[in-house]
Amino acid sequence: MAQGGGGPQEFVHHEPFSELLKVETEVRLAAAAAKFCQNPGCTRVGQGKSGLCIAHGGGRRCQMEACTKGAQGKTPFCSAHGGGKRCQSQGCPKTSRGATPFCSAHGGGKRCAKEGCSTAAVGSTPMCTAHGGGKRCTHVNEDAREDGVSDGKCTKSAQGASMLCSAHGGGRRCSKEGCKKSAQGKRLLCSAHGGGNRCTQEGCTKGAVGRTQYCIGHNGGTRCEFQGCDKSARGSTLFCKNHGGGRRCMHAGCTKSSKATTVFCISHGGNKRCAHQGCPKSAYKSAFCPSHGPMRADHGAPSSATTATNEGQPKMPIDAPFTNQQPVRTAASAVRFPVQPPPQLLQLLQSLAQSSPLMTPLGNGASVSGSTRLKCKASERLGARF
């Protein structure tokens, strides 16, 4: 207690400054935590009184029936149902991107940083899908890695919420039972089962290719740019397989096209291999090569068509004598019945068979040249007549 002119005074003990700072920091952290999404593991900012981010149901929702997406801007609808800012290009119903008044197709949003590319950048990357932007497929080709040709990583873009491209199982799949292909368009069907855009050629049921309205057979899709070639371009290239388009064999010095999902041509181990033990050949239309497939197992056996054609044809014994009666000749019996020899030769052979006990009559299926002795005597008798 200190003595002063006005009487005794008491000292006021204040809390240390560090304690006050600690309390204030805790209050601020609690306030900041309240702004984040309350969904476990989410680091986005919560919207409104819900305490959830837009992805987890926070904020204003789209007023369209059965739609659960967030409303965009000052509109009561999501982007898919007309909400938010729209593209200013005439006739375009899409949403404008970023601070620009246009959609991605009309130049809005971020563009690819690759020199000369005008395509929109994907996601948070500065590149388009063709130049490595967006999520990439995580599939690894172990065969290519073991051969040392490449690291085996797939360079395609991942589809949907998956981390795989369409070829390796990413994105929406066809709903047809037993089909593993990628779904096309708004329907959950692949192109082979009716999904996606169809060819507009009258009577054609195939799928339209690319941004065209026709299938490949009706000149749809990108065409080969080689002069005089009207075939379809392969992959992201501008040429057909014959002119260097599509995926090429990774073997050093090889210019052939790679087969199926492998990175090699058939000569260098690409495509499916024969399932027969120890066979290095390529499989053809089955799990086996032509040498070990079902066709090989039936080799040599008469086909059902041949058996049905020959059924009912007359069968003549080998030792039957020649006659002047011509058998009925058909396409199936043309090989079975030989050409009849001239009548003069028939009479000569019959007379020789009766006069010589060492000779026997020739059968209908036997050849005239089957007996050297008979042939020589027949030539001497006939002379210039035969």
Image (cartoon, helix red, strand yellow):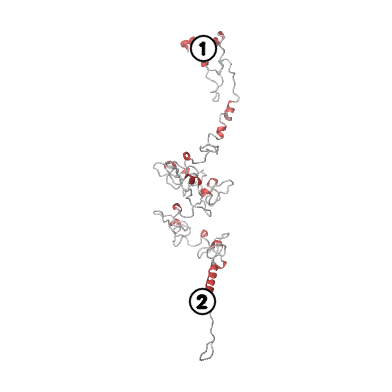
Q: Amino acid at mark 1?
A: Arg
- Name the residue rendered at 54%, 10% in the picture: 352
Residue placed most toward the observer, 334 or 122: 122
Residue at which label 2 appears? 17
Residue 307: give x, y in percent of width and height.
Answer: 59, 27
Name the amino acid, label 2.
Answer: Phe
* Residue toward you, 116 or 325: 116
Instruction: Judge whether residue 79 can be spotted in this image.
Output: yes
Task: Indicate whether 244 appears above or below 368.
Answer: below
Q: Residue furthest top?
A: 355
Secondary-structure class at tag 2: helix
Mark nearer the N terminus (2 vs 1): 2
Image point 53% across, 45% down: which residue?
192
Q: Nearer the viewer, residue 55 or 31?
A: 31
* Residue 344 in view in this figure: no
Q: Which residue is mark 1?
A: 373
Q: Position of residue 289 (x, y in %)?
A: 53, 36
- Give x and y (percent) for residue 134: 47, 55
Q: Residues within 10 Å of mark 2 (few under 14, many from 20)?
A: few
Q: Which mark is residue 231?
A: none
Could you tell me which secondary element the residue under label 1 belongs to?
helix
